[in-house]
Image: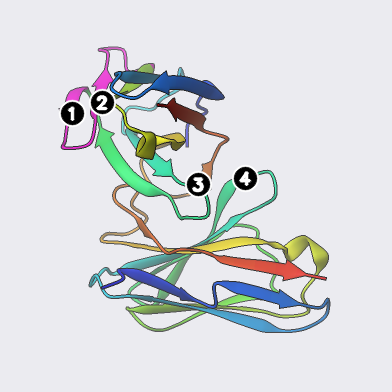
Amino acid sequence: DTAVSQTPKYLVTQMGNDKSIKCEQNLGHDTMYWYKQDSKKFLKIMFSYNNKELIINETVPNRFSPKSPDKAHLNLHINSLELGDSAVYFCASSQGRESLREQYFGPGTRLTVT
Amino acid sequence: LAKTTQPISMDSYEGQEVNITCSHNNIATNDYITWYQQFPSQGPRFIIQGYKTKVTNEVASLFIPADRKSSTLSLPRVSLSDTAVYYCLVGRNTDKLIFGTGTRLQVFP
């Protein structure tokens, strides 16, 4: 069983479009995250949700909107996509708020904006 | 998170022990030292976390001197499958978390 899953794995779209990436975890964790890994390979935290509450929003443009319908799901919706949004987006989960310890990452979604 | 410095890359051969050192001179009292591993086209995977002295699990050991200004991740008897990027993180939570460039370990047969 996949612990943290993301769909889709690849996403190619044009500038200005709106797209969503879905994430699900079956580990029973109470905290989920979204990360962005850019072309320079830096992996940066974007959002963190604990028990469906947003607890981190690290200077991410408001075109990015996370939605957590329940503790097991954290989706990422992106409006008006820009070229600079091209990156790999990783979802992760952990037990405990904002924990550095034992975050389980999904396989990533490679987003290409043309 | 505290600023960390680790080698950009390291080479090793199968069966050897690999030690990757991370410097973190401005570590705070409450900070933990955490290591992650990332394979190409995959998300990072937690390896080990420690606060002081030595921590060992089935995958690696983490050595932390008394001043805690550095730490060493030790991988015993590496294999080709240990080829990956290794990240050292120093902090207490994920506030402003950025995984740096890490150490790219290449294991040769």
Tell me the distance, in whole angstroms, between the alpha carbons under discs 1 and 2: 5 Å
Tell me the distance, in whole angstroms, between the alpha carbons under discs 4 and 2: 25 Å
Residue B23 shows in this picture: no
Q: Please state which of the two labelled residues, at mark 4 or mark 3, is closer to the viewer.
A: 4
Which badge, 1 or 3, is on the more N-terminal residue?
Answer: 1
According to the picture, the residue beneath numbered tag 4 turns out to be A41
Identify whether B71 is placed above or below A58: above
Quadrant that contains the N terminus of chain A:
bottom left
Q: Mark 4 near mark 3, Cβ–Cβ under 8 Å?
A: no
Identify whether B102 is placed above or below A89: above
Residue name at image x 31 percent, y 71 percent: A2
Quadrant that contains the C terminus of chain A:
bottom right
Tell me the distance, in whole angstroms, between the alpha carbons under discs 4 and 3: 14 Å
Q: Please state which of the two labelled residues, at mark 1 or mark 3, is closer to the viewer.
A: 1
Give the residue type that dot 2 points to. Leu
Q: Please state which of the two labelled residues, at mark 1 or mark 4, is closer to the viewer.
A: 4
Q: Chain of mark 2?
A: B
Residue name at image x 65 percent, y 75 percent: A11
Mark 2, other Cα within 10 Å: few <14 / some 14–19 / many ≥20: many
Which badge, 1 or 2, is on the more N-terminal residue?
Answer: 1
* Rendered image quadrant of residue A14: bottom right
Confirm whether circles 4 and 3 share one chain: no
Q: Nearer the viewer, residue B29 or A83?
A: A83
